[in-house]
Image: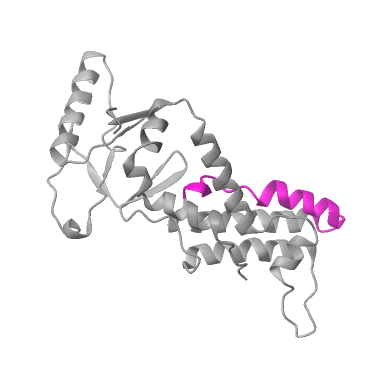
Amino acid sequence: MANLIINHLFYADDLALLCPSQRGLQELLEICEKYAHEHDIKFNTKKSVVLIRRSKLLKNAVVAPFILCNEKLSEVNEIRYLGHFLTADGKDDKDMTNACRQLYAQGNSLIRKFHMCTEKVKIKLFVNYCSQFYCAQLWRFSKTDKSYRKLCVAYNNVFRFFLKLPKDAQDRPCSASGMFVTRNVKSFQEIMRNLIFKFRCRLNVSDNDLVKAVLFNNVADRSKLRKHWNELLLVQGTDGG
């Protein structure tokens, strides 16, 4: 990519191999095996797995097992790498579902411990503890996706319950947009757009060769993630729940 070979990524003791072909990936595994033998390194073949992103035409294709240190590696449909779920279908539902569960847990904890605080203190606590979404700028979703809608509703509900906001005359929850605007708190959609905008700004000024190779090429211009970013930043979202 951009005259730069990118086939392996290291982070501490985690190693990720990237390859567009079955034969190429097996060759990379053999190189790792040879290096491990020469430098007295042992790979944990039980924890080492293979994740294959298949195209629609090859979704039912049978792939021969990959071998590392004479052991077959298990093929999985999802794996958690550095706190982010990678899936064979490329969807981020797992991450959003996990974030929704954590948000409710954090919200219930705040409600239980700080229900006697003033609204000003509660808002500060909510912003600090319920507005952080790890790797959310990498999520790709539509506003009709169930996982996204549930997370958006969870964010709104936790805020309502924590601040004990009253219902309207028709016994309906107060307006999501109104309750955030009047208290100068970012809505969930604003948080997502803010994360994406800041992330893109950091990417554009990065001096990392890998980042530049991925960012400044023709493939990146056609990527679904970049298209998703553009849609979120240019189109005003609607509140959920």
Comparing 53 with 231, the one in front is: 231
* Image mark count: 0
Question: Magenta: predominant secondary structure element?
Answer: helix
Q: Quadrant of residue 27?
A: top left
Image location (x, y in percent) of residue 54: 23, 53
Image-based side of 39 in relation to 125, left or right? left
Residue at 22 percent of width and 55 percent of height: 55
Image location (x, y in percent) of residue 72: 18, 39
Position of residue 120 relative to residue 46, above or below, is below
Position of residue 96 relative to residue 21, above or below, is below
Residue at 36 percent of width and 49 percent of height: 223
Image location (x, y in percent) of residue 115: 81, 58
Which residues fall within the magenta stretch? 114-138
Residue at 49 percent of width and 53 percent of height: 230
Comparing 4 with 95, the one in front is: 4
The quarter of the rendered structure image containing the N terminus is: top left
